[in-house]
Image (spheres, coloured by chain):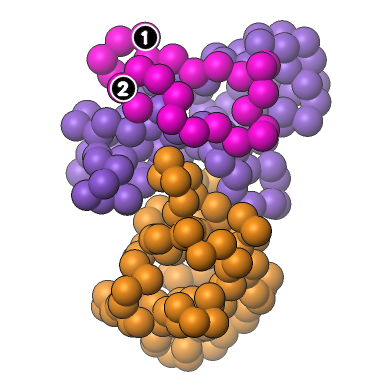
Chain colours: A purple, B orange
Amino acid sequence: EPEVTQTPSHQVTQMGQEVILRCVPISNHLYFYWYRQILGQKVEFLVSFYNNEISEKSEIFDDQFSVERPDGSNFTLKIRSTKLEDSAMYFCASSADRQVSYEQYFGPGTRLTVT
Amino acid sequence: QQQVKQSPQSLIVQKGGISIINCAYENTAFDYFPWYQQFPGKGPALLIAIRPDVSEKKEGRFTISFNKSAKQFSLHIMDSQPGDSATYFCAARSAGNMLTFGGGTRLMVKP
């Protein structure tokens, strides 16, 4: 069964450093998303991406964040200068078609720890 | 207005019992309501979903009941099993296919 994959599973970084989280969405999917989950809290939407541009973004997704689809398979989230409060689980998700199917499939997540 | 409120925060059910988790929303623009199951250390997995023109949807032991006028929906897990022990999140979709999640319910099914 196709699945969303994410690397690394755990990333430790120092405050102020840049991090790139990587995702490989399901191969025929067209819509891509990033969500985050601070430990013990609910899942929060960050950004959606379609046709090589951002479709929607939340208030959390400020200028420190960027997304990119550098090739036909990867989808990345970059945090330019990490803060302690960026420590969270980051989930990538993908969906086939926003109009026909709203189903979003999530990857296993990357745990980001900022020290 | 974008919030989805979920209750209870935690739930303990005996094996074979019925687990009921409730969610409420304010934004009438929400047009799709999925439920996700999450095991520790894993990503949310889509369990079942409903659109607001349907009042009930059943898949196996899982049923969503939807009350559009009350802006409430619930997940019922029949014949709950220890393997169902997980955190359950309701969610609601808005423009841009953005999902707004509820706060989660930690379900424990006792053998």
Q: Is residue A14 above or below residue A93?
A: above
Question: For residue A75, what is the image quadrant?
Answer: top left
Give the letter of the chain under mark 1: A
Amino acid at pointer 2 = Asn
- In the image, is residue A68 part of the stretch drawn in magenta? yes
Secondary structure at numbered mark 1:
loop
Q: Tell me the magenta residue range.
A: A50-73
Residue at (26% x, 46% y) in the render:
A99
* B104 or B56: nearer the viewer: B56
Seen at 49% across and 82% down, the residue is B69
Q: Say which residue appears at 35% left-offset and 45% top-offset.
A: A105
- Residue A95: x and y in percent read 31, 40
Q: Is residue A90 left or right of residue B62?
A: right
The residue wearing badge 2 is A51
The residue that appears at 25% across and 41% down in the rendered structure is: A97
Position of residue A7 measured from the top left corner of the image (x, y, whole percent): 46, 23
Q: Quadrant of the N terminus of chain B?
A: bottom right
Asked if residue A93 shows in the view, the reply is: yes
Q: Which mark is residue A91?
A: none
Kindly identify which chain the residue marked by label 2 belongs to: A
Q: Mark 1 highlights which residue?
A: A70
Residue A10: which quarter of the image? Answer: top right
x, y percent for residue A37: 62, 43
B45 to B11, vertically: above or below: above
Q: Does the rendering let one see residue B15?
A: no
